[in-house]
Amino acid sequence: MKSKTLQITLIYTIISIIMAVICHKLLTTYFSSSEYPYFSLIKDIVFILITVLVFSFILSKNEKRNITIFEKLNKTNEEIKESNEKYDIVAKATSDTIWDWKIQEDSINWNKGIEGVFGYDPKEVGKTSKWWFDKIHPEDSIRMSIKLYSFIEQKTEKWQDQYRFRCADGSYKYVLDRGFLLKDENGRAIRMIGAIQDITKQKEEEQRLKLLETVITQSKDSILITEANSSERKIPKIVYVNPAFSQMSGYQSNEIIGKSPNIFKGPKSDSDELKKLLSAIKNEEECLIETISYTKSKEEYWVRFSMIPIFSNEGLISHWISIQRDITDEKKLETEKEHLIRELTQNNKDLKQFSYITSHNLRAPLSNLIGLLNLMEDIPIENEELQEIVAGFTKSTHLLNETINDLVKVIIIKDNPSMQKEEVSLKEVFENVFSQLSFQIELHKPIIKLKFDKVPELITNKAYIESILLNLLTNSIKYKSENRKLKISITAEQIEQRTILTFKDNGIGIDLERNRDKIFGLYQRFHNYPDSKGLGLYLVKSQVETMGGTISIDSEVNKGTTFTITFKN
Amino acid sequence: MIMLEQILCIDDDPITLMLCKKVISKSSFSHEVITAQNGEEALHHFNVLKYTNDKAKKRPELIFLDLNMPIMGGWEFLDHFTSSDYIEFNTVPVIVLSSTIDPEDLAKAKKYPIIIDFLSKPITQPMLEYLKKKIDL
């Protein structure tokens, strides 16, 4: 612009000087000196007019051009402004963090995302690429920088990478960084602009899904997924099977995907169960079935499987998930168990019958003996020796009878695990027991303390509780100490949901250190008493347990014995 | 207290039968005790009674019945005896006298209204005293 102005000025000066010289020559040559001032004035006026015309032409032309330039400039400015606004909006809308890296100067600028997404105060954000690389997770940073620089060297335009970027609070976020490279006319990389996207959630979701997937792939249960073309009322096609399924069925996944699960069906498959399955498919309901299935090599196996319908957000069925388990061993065990139970039940029944017959056959002649002895009582015997023999005979017969009667009681208790229970008054039970033992009580006059006020009544079997107390009381009297008066205390208490009967005496006691394991055993005797049969406590324990209770003993030699009977209410 | 005219004891064991006879006569329970060794023999006795026109011939007023017997046991005897064939005797009460401990026998006995009691051997005088009261009632 300056040179042009100088040019115009120079040309004008030269032309003006030339014109001034020429006019002067012409005036001096053709006109007299008197006329000269007159023509000189005209010449000056003409010259001024021409100059004015030329100037006005140039100025007007310049002005036009300036306006155009100004308008152009304005327009460009507007465009830049708009473009900047758009950039800001886009940067906000994408929620990406945008960076602008001038590679030559190594200066990098970040948009507001570095604050919003990663929590950095604008003041702490560094201005060089080093700050950027420093924030990348140590496990990712080498890989990432190698990839980035090799990309810059190759000078292709687009670049993207995933890495972990450290936030202001020290935690890491998974990011997807995408960049665009700008080059100068020589093809040198001068600038790179990128956008960092926070993909932590996607990554976490990805990892969660991966974890969930391992459940399916690693599961010992077989999993099969089918599509759900329930509208056609056919068995839907398989879309997925897990490795456990392949192992169970012998089919590799590529061999059965797209096929119908009908291929597992065979002659021994349970048709009722399959009908159940079809109806569940028709009604889009969950179901659980057990049937015999067939492997690829047509081997049978028992399978228990559930079918669970999967619905889309719109509530339409999309798939069926079937979780299956090979229960062949289980079934085998079950059959064996059933067989064993049947056998045991039969054995038990036979044994029971045997015990009834045996006891009948023992009792029949014994009852004859007793009957005959009863008859003999009325016949006087003269011979003293014979009298003695008959007395011994009578005693032995009665002892045998008692033993057999006790054994019969045991058999009956063992045979009737469930017996009738009723409301029983403990006081009444004791009155009955005392009346049966009135002879012994009168003879030994024990001090008996009863404390039933807390549990006056008990839901139990009357005959059993009477038998239990009769046995315990008989034992107390039988095994009383000769050195002191017999004291018996019987209490009933209610503790939470339990009724506790305590039966305590001050008799000769039992050496528990030696006998604890045998105390409630059959035919166990702990004292050398002629009429002890070793059945009483066994019977007591059987009766307590038949009524759902427990019995325990505490005893000290020469101090006494305490029995604690507990019934759950 | 009345004394029965005739009772029938059905048992395969001669000692039981002997005991029955002796204890019954001692307790003045019945004038006469007749016996049968099993159910079949007892039915035969009733058949004879049925087809003889001798109205004067005594009929048992009570039966003591054992359960386990050869040829025909107690239950089989009862099934015949309670059928329409012996309808004219169905007012004769039966007392089971056995050594059984099988609860099933007890349960079964409840199904026969003709059985008025279920007693355990041996037969004793107190037992007969008790029965006398029971029958009089």
Image (cartoon, rainbow, N blue to C red):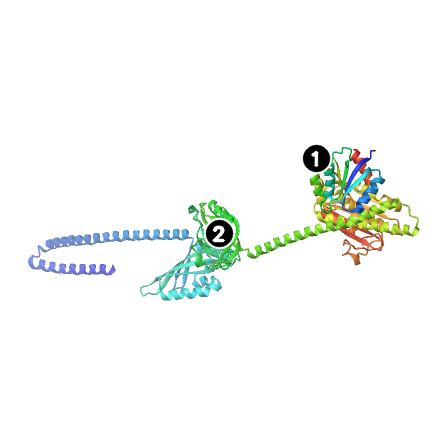
Which numbered marker is on residue A389?
A: none
Q: Nearer the viewer, residue A378 or A558?
A: A378
| Drawn side of residue A195 relative to residue A66, left or right | right
Query: Residue A39 appears at what percent x and percent y?
Result: 10, 54
Residue type, mark 2 in image: Ile
Between disc 2 and disc 1, the foreground one is: 1
Q: Residue at x 77, y 37 (%)?
A: B62
Q: Nearer the viewer, residue A316 or B109?
A: B109
In which quarter of the view is residue B120 placed?
top right
**Labelled pair 2, 1 in contact (Cβ < 8 Å):** no
Q: Secondary structure at mark 2?
A: strand
Quadrant where the C terminus of chain A is found in the figure = top right
Report if residue A338 is visible in the image: yes
Residue under pointer 2 = A321
Residue under pointer 1 = B87
Q: Nearer the viewer, residue A560 or A18?
A: A560
Q: Chain of mark 2?
A: A
Quadrant where the N terminus of chain A is found in the figure = bottom left
Q: Chain of mark 1?
A: B
| Drawn side of residue A163 relative to residue A389, left or right | left
Query: Residue A499 appears at what percent x and percent y?
Result: 74, 45
Q: Residue at x 87, y 46 (%)?
A: A376
Q: Nearer the viewer, residue A407 or A248?
A: A407
| Marks 2 and 1, how far apart at CA | 73 Å
Residue type, mark 1 in image: Ile
Report if residue A471 is visible in the image: no
| Drawn side of residue A168 relative to residue B131, left or right | left
Query: Residue A130 appears at what percent x and percent y?
Result: 45, 64
Q: Residues within 10 Å of mark 1 (few under 14, many from 20)?
A: few
Query: Residue A26 appears at what percent x and percent y?
Result: 9, 59
Q: Residues within 10 Å of mark 2 (few under 14, many from 20)?
A: many
Q: Secondary structure at mark 1?
A: helix
